[in-house]
Image (cartoon, rainbow, N blue to C red):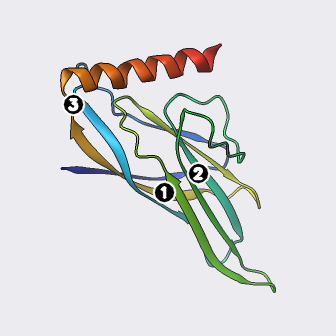
Amino acid sequence: MPIKSFRGLIADGSIDTVTLHTNTGATGYRIKKLSLMPDKPVTAANECVIQIWKVPQTAASSDVDFSNQTLLGVGLYSNQTDTTYYPDDQTVIFDNEIFNQDIYITHVNETGSRPCNYYLELEQIKLDQTENTVATLKDIRNIESQSS
């Protein structure tokens, strides 16, 4: 199955949109890989939290809630560069859910305002009519529950 990759440098407190929707919704996606690296991993301390969402977000947050059904994945990258140096640490967790609409990436850096790089691989999946309908209805429900 084909893999689509996306990468970017996202500012602290920002939200990026990954455009995936199509007119027919016949192409689905599943996260295969998420990697993070701050823009200055050796010379600046970082505590970056990147989250991937199924619905648009109004603000970026470092709060993580796995019970939120609109959350697709989370990455945490931390390092320290001052006299109490500690090595790079990265934790990435993502769901195996299939989606067929745009996704939204948020970033918060808890130790400052530095941006963070992300690299995202999505597995491309051909959806039959039933799978397409189910994925689209889930997305509609998530958008409606987010706005109420």
Q: Three-letter amino acid code at disc 3?
A: Leu
User: In the rendered image, which quarter is residue 79 located in?
Assistant: bottom right
The residue lying toward the viewer, choosing from 88 and 43, is 88
Of badges 2 and 1, the one in the foreground is: 2
Residue under pointer 2: 50
Q: Earlier in the sequence, mark 1 or mark 3?
A: 1
Tell whether 104 sits left or right of 30: right
Q: Earlier in the sequence, mark 2 or mark 3?
A: 2
Q: Three-letter amino acid code at disc 2?
A: Ile
Gap in Å between the C-alphas at discs 1 and 3? 27 Å
Image quarter hosting the C terminus: top right
User: In the rendered image, which quarter is residue 75 located in?
Assistant: bottom right
Residue 52, percent across and down? 52, 43
Of badges 2 and 3, the one in the foreground is: 3
Callouts 2 and 1 close, C-beta under 8 Å: yes
Tell whether 127 sits left or right of 60: left
Q: Is residue 40 visible?
A: no
Res 127 label: 3
Residue 34, percent across and down? 45, 57
Gap in Å between the C-alphas at discs 2 and 1? 8 Å
**Local SS, label 1:** strand
Residue in view at x 39 percent, y 18 percent: 137
Residue under pointer 1: 118
Gap in Å between the C-alphas at discs 2 and 3? 28 Å
Residue 64, percent across and down? 68, 46
Crowd class of label 2 (few under 14; some 14 to 19; many from 20; radius 10 Å):
many
